[in-house]
């Protein structure tokens, strides 16, 4: 299943979501145009052996790594999910809380991956943990939304599915993949996805955000 579009607009211009996408794009361009790509990645990505929680100066990559990507497909995948689900979460939290939530979710997700990474030289980077937090929040706050989804089962077709099914299935896949490759040996930060999603769920349950019925517009009315 691959999400194409959710059924309801946030009714706002999601400036923070757009800004996050723009920053990620800018960093990707810098990454690909720098003379020393490996040096650029090693400086700003998170490498477990370089982290010392007793030295705050080594903790910068917990944030900077959230804006790096391994390749264009990695970037497009993360930003695609963010632009589908981010505007509703931003509308619910408000721009300032949403920005803090996104960064906090990414940091928590990265720390979750650190716990399950056995190789200290592993390079951890990408927005997927922070985006997973957005998905977890959406899963709780907008269960009545539907998502137009591309499905490939013998045939390729589109179907509107409840967001809980789309995002719930996504989380189950991450969880099963994380359990089967606990060390992250496949090169995918499954536990960052899991940790970010759980963080988003917890924040959503604690959130006193606006009621979606009064603030979100069903795009099918247009």
Image: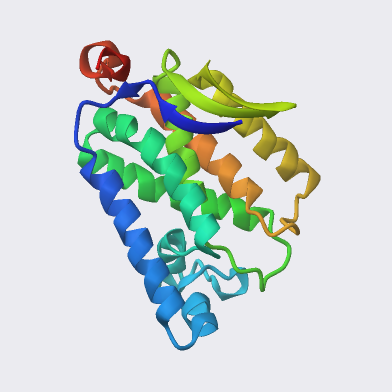
25 left or right of 136? left
- Residue at the limit of the structure toward the bottom, as seen here: 35
- Residue in front for this viewpoint, 199 or 193: 193
Image quarter where the N terminus lies is top right
Residue at 44% x, 58% y is 66
Q: Nearer the viewer, residue 202 or 154?
A: 154
Q: Position of residue 57 (x, y in %)?
A: 40, 74
Q: Position of residue 147 (x, y in %)?
A: 47, 23
Q: Is residue 184 left or right of residue 76?
A: right
Give whichever of 60, 16 is nearer the camera: 16
Q: Position of residue 72 (x, y in %)?
A: 50, 61
Against 212, is 128 above or below? below
Q: Is residue 180 above or below residue 167?
A: below
- Residue drawn at the location 53% of the way across and 34% of the way down: 198
| Residue at the extreme right | 180
Identify the image quadrant of residue 154.
top right
**Residue 56 quadrant:** bottom left
Q: Could you say which is closer to the camera, residue 83 or residue 155?
A: 155
Q: Residue at x 51, y 32 (%)?
A: 3
Residue occupying the point 61% across, 58% down: 114
Residue 127: tell me if it is visible: no
Above or below residue 139? Residue 184 is below
Tell me the colour scheme of the image.
rainbow
From this viewpoint, is residue 1 visible? Answer: yes
List x then y, in percent, for residue 36.
Answer: 49, 87
Against 65, is 128 above or below? Answer: above
The quarter of the displayed image where residue 92 is located: top left
């Amino acid at each position: 299943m691959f999400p194409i579009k959710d059924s309801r607009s946030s009714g706002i211009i999601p400036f923070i979501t757009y800004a996050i996408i723009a920053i990620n794009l800018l960093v990707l361009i810098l990454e690909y145009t720098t003379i020393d790509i490996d040096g650029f990645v090693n400086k700003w990505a998170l490498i477990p052996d370089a982290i010392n929680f007793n030295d705050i100066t080594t903790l910068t990559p917990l944030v900077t790594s959230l804006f790096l990507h391994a390749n264009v497909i990695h970037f497009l995948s993360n930003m695609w999910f963010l632009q589908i689900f981010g505007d509703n979460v931003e509308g619910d939290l408000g721009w300032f809380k949403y920005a803090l939530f996104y960064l906090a979710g990414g940091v928590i997700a990265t720390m979750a991956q650190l716990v399950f990474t056995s190789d200290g030289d592993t390079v951890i980077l990408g927005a997927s943990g922070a985006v997973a937090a957005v998905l977890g929040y959406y899963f709780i706050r907008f269960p009545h939304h539907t998502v137009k989804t591309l499905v490939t089962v013998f045939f390729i077709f589109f179907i509107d599915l409840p967001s809980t099914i789309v995002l719930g299935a996504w989380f189950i896949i991450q969880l099963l993949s994380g359990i089967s490759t606990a060390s992250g040996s496949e090169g995918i930060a499954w536990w960052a996805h899991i940790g970010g999603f759980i963080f988003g769920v917890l924040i959503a349950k604690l959130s006193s955000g606006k009621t979606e019925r009064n603030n979100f517009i069903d795009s099918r009315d247009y």
